[in-house]
Amino acid sequence: MSQRRGLLIILSSPSGAGKSTLTRRLRDWDPTIRFSVSATTRAPRPGEVDGQDYHFLSEDQFKRDVTEGDMLEHAHVFGNFYGSPKGPVQAAIEDGQDVLFDIDWQGAEQIRNSSLAAHTLSIFILPPSIKELHRRLVSRGQDSDDVIARRMQKSWDEISHWGSYDFVLVNDNLDQTSEDLKTIVQATRLRRLQQPALVEHVRNLQTEFEEIS
């Protein structure tokens, strides 16, 4: 058995809050943290590898996995199903590996209600202000005004669910937020539940105590 159980780390934020950069920095800090590989019913795109980019499933298989409780979370997006298979994540956790999920509040809620909820660490990233969030979306230069307006509305919908997360960070200083994120992960790895070897250690302490009593 591993000295510790892995964490199921959920990172959520509105678009433009800096989540992608924070995720990259977290994985640069600890490359053993790996992304969950999602399942999907859409067809593979050129160059995509099954089991590496996605687990490509038929719609019947996907629905069967959902019915049998083998998906931690799932959603129907633009005519296709997407989800997170439970088996690989559970195996990783038992092996002491942390698995990172970049999902929205709905996916996070499903995972918090799953059988792996006890090993979940959920973190929400807030922007310093709505004005700054809008500036970041505009500065990308990728979207029309209409698309940006829709993204802003979706961002506010996402922000409204901040209160259901374990930790909430205001990303007003990227370096400090990155350090805070590492601290949260380090501390949560030390939760009693994440350290199965503690039970045996305490038993050994009891045996020692009885021997000298």
Image: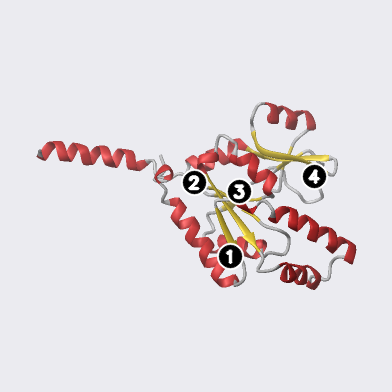
Q: CA distance from mark 3 to mark 4?
A: 34 Å
* Residue identified by numbered label 1: 25
Residue for point 64% across, 45% down: 108
Q: Nearer the viewer, mark 2 or mark 4?
A: 2
Of marks 3 and 2, the one in the foreground:
3
Report the front residue among 47 and 179: 179
The numbered disc on residue 164 is: 3
Front-lying residue, 200 or 170: 170
Q: Which image quarter: residue 14? A: bottom right
Q: Amino acid at mark 3?
A: Ser
Pick whichever of labels 2 and 1 is earlier in the sequence: 2
Task: Indicate the amino acid at tag 2.
Answer: Gly
For residue 87, above or below residue 54: above
Report the amino acid beneath label 4. Pro
Q: Which residue is mark 4?
A: 44
Distance from Cα at disc 3 to Cα at disc 2: 22 Å
Q: Is residue 57 left or right of residue 71?
A: right
State the residue position of label 2. 6
* Location of residue 81 (image quadrant): top right
Q: Earlier in the sequence, mark 2 or mark 4?
A: 2
> Picture coordinates of residue 189 (x, y %)?
45, 51
**Sequence-first tag of 4 and 1:** 1
Marks 1/3 in contact by CB < 8 Å: the verdict is no
